[in-house]
Amino acid sequence: MDVLHEKKVKFLEELAIKLREDVILMVSRAGSGHIAGPLDMAEIFATLYFHVLNHNPKDPNWPDRDRVVLSNGHICPILYATLARAGYFKREEIFTLRKLGSRLQGHPHRGVLPGVETTSGPLGLGLSQACGIALSARLDNKKYRIYCLMSDAEQQEGNTWEAVMFASKYKLSNITAIIDRNNIQIDGFTENVMPLEPLKEKYESFGWHVIEINGHDIYQIYSAIAESWAIFEKPTVIIAHTIPGKGVGFMEYDYLWHSKPFKPGEAEKALKELRSLRGKIRGEHE
């Protein structure tokens, strides 16, 4: 793995904005889809796929690859955009999102698109899937790691906590879970719908190693993931504090953008703002 030097960080920061632009283009052309979550996970996806993962886009089923389990499948536009830019399929295909017959549906399907490890739609299932993969890897004496991406609202699901107990019991240290702590869900703010706090202490009480980070800081993302590799006696969860709709001013912190169609001109306004941000990063780098 390359050293995370300043030049690489700037590359990942700019890439994250490109991924956000792709998400806006995809969802606006589809006429529907989830937006806030995909936008706020861009730095995490960029860091995973372009600096952390041991994977091979030319051989998506390589047995020793790291696995990414996307539990909150509704944020799949950011997964699709990332897979395309990583070389799993041609970027042009992202514009078929949610079209009839497309491989890129509103929730990902295993076996249809290269790089998609699990089918996800109903929330709260991903960590259980990750536990099964992790236990299988241990039984087969495999060294690959499993990264399970979850929404914060999924922590309201009972199935999630069954998996939390399972991973702790079997000391599945090859799992690194990442929670998108953006504080929103479809009906409002998580702490109004069904309070989650104190989330860190809850995971610790279940025997997990817990790290809290700014989910938009590349250094913090990588440092937390690297720390999880050094934990051998328990699974790790990274609580990534993010801003829903990150990068687009009129979307940020607004739970209504969890999923709603664009009005005329809104997508263009969002893209203009993102391109301006990308230009600033490029200018600072140069």
Image (cartoon, grey):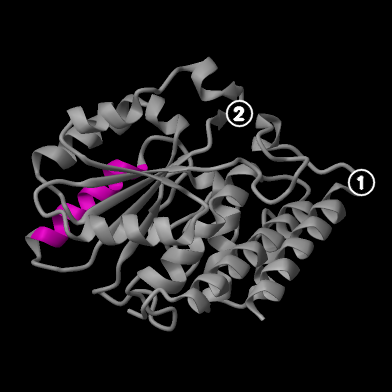
Q: Is 210 located above or below residue 141 in the figure?
A: above
Which mark is drawn over residue 264? Answer: 1
Q: Say whether marks 2 and 1 touch (CB < 8 Å).
A: no
Estimate how packed mark 2 is, as few (under 14), some (14 to 19) or many (20 or more) residues with alpha carbons within 10 Å. some
Q: Identify the residue shown where x is 9% and y is 38%.
A: 169
**272 relative position to 146: left or right:** right
Q: Secondary structure at mark 1?
A: loop
Instruction: Please tell me whether mark 2 sits on a helix, a strand or a loop.
Output: loop
Mark 1, Cα crowd under 10 Å, few <14 / some 14-19 / many 20+, is: few
Q: Position of residue 228 (x, y in %)?
A: 24, 55
Residue 186 placement, left or right of 227: right
Residue 188, x across and y down, in percent? 61, 23
Q: Would you identify the image quadrant in which residue 94 lies?
A: bottom right
Disc 2 to disc 1, C-alpha distance: 22 Å
Type of amino acid at the residue the image marks with label 1: Pro
Disc number for residue 186: 2
Tell me the tag on residue 240: none
**Labels 2 and 1: the sequence-earlier one:** 2
Rendered position, 59 above or below 165: below
Q: Position of residue 30 (x, y in %)?
A: 75, 53
Q: Is residue 132 magenta?
A: yes
Is the stretch drawn in magenta largely helix, strand or loop? Answer: helix
Q: Is residue 211 visible?
A: yes
Q: Is residue 34 among what the camera can see?
A: no
Q: From the image, which quarter does the N terminus lie in?
A: bottom left
Residues shaded magenta: 126-138
The disc labelled 2 sits on which kind of residue?
A: Ile
Looking at this view, is 107 or 192 the one in front? 192
Magenta span has 182?
no
Numbered-mark total? 2
